[in-house]
Image (spheres, helix red, strand yellow):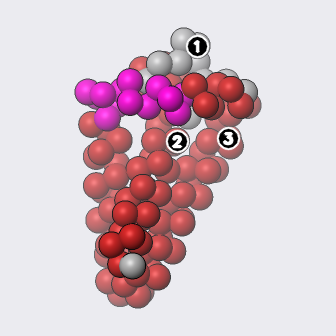
Amino acid sequence: MAAALMIALLVAVYCGFALLALSQDRHWQRAGGPLPCPARLIMPMRTLGYGLLLVALVLALMRDGAGFGSLVWATMLSVGALTVVATLTWLAHWLAPLVRILQGLA
């Protein structure tokens, strides 16, 4: 159970930061979007991104309590942010399916 919560925490942090990054035109186009990010998607993407970071906090607190859970959350924020940076730098095409899904919503 603890391992599943940790994996869910990491996925929530990664997806949250990915959505926050993709809400910027520069990263959207790097990941495969032919045009800038549609204006009507920017606010929902940012809201969902921050929401996922909040979900990650709740998961960390559920897993380890307030004292250690907040430390785990802060550490996972750093790991998730660096992972998204590495993805956008070297493997931006991995985020292309997410861009296509979001383009379909626009």
Q: Main secondary structure of the magenta part?
A: helix
Residue 18, percent from left and from top:
46, 41
Numbered disc 3: secondary structure: helix
| Residue on which disc 1 sits | 35
- Give above or below for 3 relative to 35: below
| Residue on which disc 3 sits | 43
Q: In this view, does 8 lie to the left or right of 78?
A: right
CA distance separating discs 1 and 3:
17 Å
CA distance separating discs 2 and 3:
10 Å
Residue 88 visible, this angle: yes
- Residue located farthest toward the top when viewing the structure as drawn: 34
- Kindly identify the amino acid type of the residue bearing the numbered disc 1: Leu
Q: In which quarter of the image is the N terminus?
A: bottom left
Give the mark, 1 or 2, whose residue is nearer the N terminus.
Answer: 2
Tell whether position 67 is magenta: no
Instruction: Point out the stretch of residues depicted in magenta.
Output: 87-99
Residue 84, percent from left and from top:
35, 41
- Kindly identify the amino acid type of the residue bearing the numbered disc 2: Leu
